Amino acid sequence: MSRLLTLEDLDLAQLHGVRVLTRVDFNVPIADGKVMDDTRLTEVLPTLSELAAAGARVVLVAHQGRPKGQPNPKYSLKPAADRLAELIGKPVAFAADCVGEPAASAVAALKPGGLCLLENLRFHPGEEANDAAFAGELARLGEAYVDDAFGAAHRAHASTVGAAALLPRRAAGRLLVKEVTALSRLLGSPERPFAALLGGAKIEGKIDTLSNLLPRLDRLMVGGGMANTFLAAQGKDLQRSLVETERLELARSILEQAAERGVEVLLPTDLVVTDDLETPQRIETVAADAVPAGCLAVDVGPETRRAFAAAIATSRTLFWNGPLGVFEKPPFDAGTSAVAQALAGCQGFTVLGGGETVAAAHRAGVAEQVSHVSTGGGASLEFLAGRVLPGVAALEAP
């Protein structure tokens, strides 16, 4: 990968009064007009503070949810503007649209050092289509471009690729640089033993990441619904548990490749099972090959937690994506929580990726003890799959 352009390339001393179109990732949970998790907002504060301190006129653009190219109040970014103002300690103006007269007026009113957040980019179909005309409208709002939205870097959209190409003065923000630097460590020459812990419901979506990481790994731990498919591939009867039957052959192939490469694979040896997720009458811990009829696996058992914790403790580099059970429904969060605690005690370089994984780390109170918490689940998986992220490629030095 070529060198990423950074804020130093923009020359902060020359930004006074300059309109800087700044792509951020404010796709955050909002309920009753309030931001429920402001992690993505706090992560871009260093970039926004630097730009404002340099006297730039900071024009923020972002998306929220999937409004399907139509304005929808449910997906308004106004709550994000309000929360950002509280976090950064200064007013953040808000425009009712990201293009047209509302955007132009809001930008014209910006003073040096001021910030303005424009309404949801995805209220226009041109954003996701990377429409040239829409990208042009966005680019006209700025004289320079900064992208600090790693969570959207795997999308070739108007705000991440189209507008960037139209503004020669462009750079990656501090968060995007931090993300690329941290994840690149996993693909370069990671300190060994290098371990990956993969969970979540499905193998699908992680196949390419796993294929790219496998030759680099010393050990692979698998939990969650994803582990059920591997266990079923070994001939175990998981009863009513989530199993991707169409991926059984793939799971066998991954296990064979791991064996050929000398990669240690840790699968659950015991499972927490229940008769019903919503109104459980029966919850018990059983061996992975002894799931009772009518039951489904909802978490890894104590024996598996200890084995995973021991492997984590001796790892020098570790990547974790995906919870190990139905962690949003206590008591089925015990396995995920135990692994999160083990990760906090790991002395190596640890990386978390994925919204659910990050949420689990925060819930366990260990996010601050992890080396790097990625703000982009899909983007981090695609980066680790070895793919070129369009939003990153757009910011590489010529």
Image (tube, helix red, strand yellow):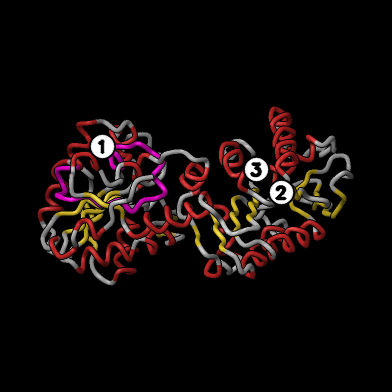
At which x and y percent is residue 7?
Answer: 25, 59
Tell me the quarter of the image containing the N terminus: top left
Q: Residue 297 appears at what percent x and percent y?
A: 77, 46
The answer to which quarter of the image holds residue 155 is top left
Q: CA distance from mark 1 to mark 2?
A: 46 Å
Residue 225: image x %, image y %?
Answer: 70, 43
Where does the C terminus fall, quadrant-wise? top left
Where does the magenta region start and end? 139-161
Q: Residues within 10 Å of mark 3 (few under 14, many from 20)?
A: many
Label 2 vs 3, first from the N-terminus = 3
Query: Which residue is at 49% across, 44% downward?
Result: 378
Q: Which residue is the site of mark 1?
A: 162
Residue at horizontal 55%, vertical 64%? 362
Q: Which mark is residue 278?
A: 2
Q: Kindly indicate the quadrant of the structure image that contains residue 194.
A: bottom right
Q: Secondary structure at mark 2?
A: loop
For the residues labelled 2 and 3, the Cα–Cα distance comes to 17 Å
